[in-house]
Amino acid sequence: MTGETQPDQVPVFVPTIDEGTLRAVAEAFDVGWLGMGAATRSFEEAIARVLGCPPERVVATNTGTSALHIAVVLAGCGPGDEVIMPSFTFVADHQAVLATGATPVLCDIREDDLGLDPDRVAALITDQTKAIMPLHYAGIPCALEEIRSLAAEHQLRVIEDAAHAFGTELAGVPIGGDGDLVCFSFDPVKVITSIDGGAVVVADDEEAKRAQRLRLLGIDRDTELRYRNQRAWDYDVTEIGYRYHLNTISAAIGLSQIARLEEFLDARQRWCRMYNDLLADVRSISLPRTDFTDVSPFIYAIRVHDGQRETVQAALAERGIATGIHFVPAHRLTLLRDAPRGDLTVTEQVGDEILTLPLHASMSADTVARVCEVIRTELQG
Ligand SMILES: *Cc1c(COP(=O)(O)O)cnc(C)c1O
């Protein structure tokens, strides 16, 4: 139904929405309950099955950003507290921290996986540090084990931005399966989508209850009833909360997508491996250092060296091939230009070189070959 509708144009992202999704939406409308409801609970259970964690720990939200905000609140962050995080991540992370009044402390990444550099993190820990917030860039796991031991040593929370990594496994355990606070996004371009949506996965049942209240305006006893398509009229509110819950229609779309996760991952891994193969001997670029086993690839991003990123981008654009940039480092944004930071040498370089190539479950081998050929010709003549 969707796909490369204009044969010559290759977008960066294409959602894979099918008849099953339309049916799921029609059925959800038939139930006559549109707000957070039984479908939301089913979506959380389906997420838990992918992660291999108890369903009680999964709290679905209306965006990935709201999941991140809830996680930062759960970590106890407020004014005067610091969160160590990459500059090289989506600004949603920095906004989630700023929303609590806490301070993002920008940290460098490693060349290897473009995730937080644990040695650099260690150097930034102060008495004000409350949490470390790593990103699994492009779906490739960061140095999670080292970050966890740093956090344990200094009694910090670990808030994983796993927006890119739904379905990724590390040492046989899905990202989010055994974490502290782990956040996912199901926005329109992610590997699976609920149009807009997200989830925060928490470490214990107590914290899950609090996350449910934070999600629903602080209301203490409505969640259980809404999971049965009912509402409480007699409730209490004891703390500040947000309007972050996930509606039935989005949940139904998410459920129809999660049913195809394996298929999406297989296809995306296949295209990423093909990119790695076809670009392996091209001069002036670096490729992701993974063979994509156990990786849920959200984007396929290369580095173009020697100041040639913009020329490669232009050459691709001329042939109808769109590219993206994930990310402009946050310290280059006006909002964060004065944010405290460590040395950002790798971030600076990667920020100038990173280039996202098209990747969709429904793309074709011909398209991948076409993209690679343009890059090869541009860089090697
Ligand atoms: C998509 C994304 C988010 C935010 O998710 P939304 O659902 O769009 O709010 C956060 N971090 C990263 C790295 C993302 O790619």
Image (tube, rainbow, N blue to C red):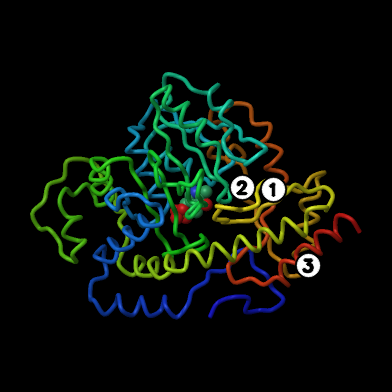
Q: What is the three-letter code of the residue carrying label 3?
A: Glu
* Cβ at disc 2 under 8 Å from ligand 1: yes
Q: Are marks 2 and 1 in contact (CB under 8 Å)?
A: yes
Q: Which of marks 1 and 3 is nearer the N terminus?
A: 3
* Cβ at disc 3 under 8 Å from ligand 1: no
Which secondary structure lies at badge 2?
loop
Q: What is the three-letter code of the residue carrying label 1?
A: Ile
Q: What is the three-letter code of the residue carrying label 2?
A: Phe
Residue at position x 36%, y 66% in the image: 250
Instruction: Please provide percent x and percent y for residue 31.
Output: 24, 76
User: In which quadrant of the rendered image does the C terminus lie?
Assistant: bottom right
Instruction: Please provide percent x and percent y for residue 317.
Output: 74, 65
Which secondary structure lies at badge 3?
helix
**Residue picked out by circle 3:** 318
Q: Are marks 1 and 3 in contact (CB under 8 Å)?
A: no
- Above or below, comparing residue 82 to residue 59 in the picture: above
**Residue picked out by circle 1:** 354
Residue at position x 18%, y 64% in the image: 228
> Is 142 on the left-hand or right-hand side of 25?
right
Q: Residues within 10 Å of mark 1 (few under 14, many from 20)?
A: many
Q: Distance between the residues labelled 2 and 3?
A: 22 Å
Q: Distance between the residues labelled 1 and 3?
A: 19 Å
**Residue picked out by circle 2:** 327
> Is 103 on the left-hand or right-hand side of 31?
right
Q: Do the residues labelled 2 and 3 touch (CB within 8 Å)?
A: no
Which secondary structure lies at badge 1?
strand
> Is 86 on the left-hand or right-hand side of 7?
left
Please tell me which residue lies in front, 176 or 162: 176
Residue at position x 34%, y 80% in the image: 26
